[in-house]
Image: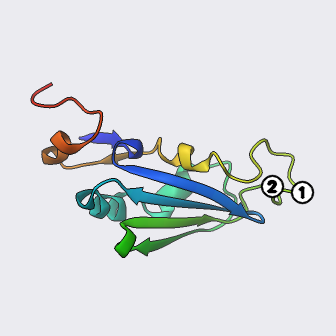
Amino acid sequence: MIVRLLDIAHARSGDKGDTANIGLIALRPEFYPILVKEVTADRVKAHFNGVCHGLVERFELRNLMALNFLLHNSLGGGGTLSLRTDAQAKTFSAALLRMEVEVPDELGDVIEGRPRGGG
C-alpha cells in the first residue's frame, strides 16, 4: 500500500548556512526499515527538485530510528542572504512528509489515521 511519510514518521528541519537539515523519525520501530529502504538520498533530491541545487546526504541513526538529510545549496545563500520566504528551512520537514512510500499491507492496521479492519 502507498502512504505518505506523515503516516509513519515525524520530522524536524532547520538550516546551517545554505544547507537544509531534515530529521525523519519513525513513529514505530517497524516503520524504520521502511524509511531506510524507501527514503533514499536520490528520492529526497527528486522530491525537492527545483529547491535543492546541490548534493543530498543521508545519515542513518538506527538507535533513534531516524534518518538525517543534508540538502546542500537549498536556501538561496542562507538566512541572512536569501530572499526566500523560508530561508531557514523550517517548512522542509512538512514538505518531506508529503512524500509517498510503499508499506507492506500487513502494517495497515498499525498506521495512524488509516482505516482499520477492511475499510
Residues at marks 2 and 1 touching, judged by CB atoms closer than 8 Å: yes
Q: Quadrant of residue 119?
A: top left
In the displayed structure image, the side of residue 115 where residue 51 appears, left or right: right
Q: Quadrant of residue 14?
A: bottom right
Amino acid of disc 2: Gly
- C-alpha gap between disc 2 and disc 1: 7 Å
Q: Which mark is residue 76?
A: 2
Q: Which mark is residue 110?
A: none
Quarter of the figure that contains the N terminus: top left
Q: Is residue 46 above or below residue 108?
A: below
Residue 102 lies, in percent from the top left, at 29, 48
Residue 58 lies, in percent from the top left, at 50, 70
Rendered residue at 51%/48% (across/down): 96
In front: mark 2 or mark 1?
Answer: 1
Residue at image mark 1: 81
Rendered residue at 17%/47% (across/down): 107
Rendered residue at 54%/65% (across/down): 69
Amino acid of disc 1: Leu
Rendered residue at 67%/48% (across/down): 50
Label 2 sits on a secondary structure element that is loop
Label 1 sits on a secondary structure element that is loop
Neighbour class for label 2 at 10 Å: few (<14), some, many (≥20)? some
Neighbour class for label 1 at 10 Å: few (<14), some, many (≥20)? few
